[in-house]
Amino acid sequence: MISIKSLKELSLMREAGRIVARVIEELASMVKEGISTYELGERAEEIFEQFGAISAFKNYRGFPGVICTSVNEELIHGIPRREKVLREGDILSLDVGVKYNGFFADAAVTIGLGKISVEAAKLIETTRNALYTGIRLAKSEVHLGDVSHAIQQYVEEHGFSVVREFVGHGIGSGMHEEPEIPNFGEPGYGPILKKGMTIAIEPMVNLGRPEVEILSDGWTVVSKDRKLTAHFEHTICIDDREPIILTSHHLS
């Protein structure tokens, strides 16, 4: 069953969303050549503690990091580590989730480091635009399939592919709630969205083929052809009119 949040619950989720936004903004400002993804994770943990929030990811099903840091061909679930040092031309996906006062919020961005390739810039722009294409359609009385189809159509029209194995999700007092939010589908199908539902829409886009695989660390998801990937995400609340973005930040 897809839960409908009360005004009080939405207020708590909005607070969690503000923390997520703050972390993403600060980590993005730290990204430079020579910094390790471990350092980014350390700073994220410091900010969580300042707000009295906890990482939604740390120890979730055994995940060892407080955030996900995925570089280049790494799509999602990259583990922050000392030896992963960022270089000019890299693209980095930051995925941040928190639990605050019993409620979750979750968002992701992909950013380029210094001068990136033309195809990397186009991949990032397309994935960001795909997210907002989906968000604009996510209104009350709309089929979820309409949202998924619009994301897929936008991405494929621009020459990229959407990943099938991993999807977005409902979110609230649980990190992953119903429904699943695929980045592909048919219009007119799936659950009908209702005012008060909260979902995390997260296009995951590959430069090449859509297939992915998981590295030997048991977590890091990479494109099977090892071409670049990108990932954007926002937690939103369904409304009668425009959806409300609960994790809005200045990189949006």
Image (cartoon, rainbow, N blue to C red):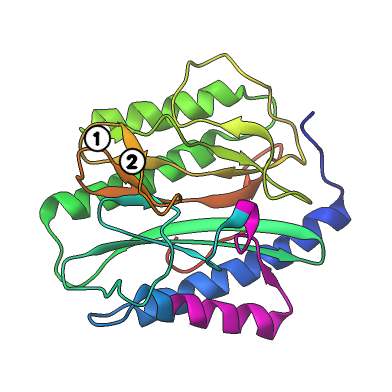
**Element on which disc 2 rests:** strand
Main secondary-structure element of the magenta-colored stretch: helix
Locate residue 139 relative to residue 206 in the image: left or right: right
Bounds of the magenta segment:
40-61
Q: Which residue carries the number 1 mark?
A: 160
Q: Specify few, some or many for label 2: CA neighbours under 10 Å numbering under 14, 14-19, or 20 or more.
A: many
**Disc on res. 205:** 2
Residue 15 location (% of width, % of height) = 72, 67
Say whether marks 1 and 2 touch (CB < 8 Å). yes
Q: Residue at x 67, y 21 (%)?
A: 191
**Element on which disc 1 rests:** loop
Residue 171 lies within the magenta run:
no
Residue 46 lies within the magenta run:
yes
Q: Residue at x 61, y 22 (%)?
A: 143
Q: Residue at x 87, y 57 (%)?
A: 8
Image position of 185 with respect to 91: above or below: above
Image position of 149 with respect to 215: above or below: above
Residue 215 location (% of width, % of height) = 35, 48
Which amino acid lies under the numbered mark 1 shown in the image of this protein?
A: Phe
Instruction: Please tell me which residue lies in front, 83 or 36.
Output: 83
| Quarter location, residue 151 | top left
Which amino acid lies under the numbered mark 2 shown in the image of this protein?
A: Val
Q: Residue at x 25, y 73 (%)?
A: 86
**Disc on res. 248:** none
Locate residue 219 relative to residue 248 in the image: left or right: left
Instruction: Please tell me which residue lies in front, 135 or 161.
Output: 161
Mark sitting earlier along the chain (1/2): 1
Residue 252 location (% of width, % of height) = 45, 60
Residue 81 location (% of width, % of height) = 39, 72
| Quarter location, residue 91 | bottom left
Q: Specify few, some or many for label 1: CA neighbours under 10 Å numbering under 14, 14-19, or 20 or more.
A: many
Work out which quarter of the rendered image holds the N terminus and state it.
top right
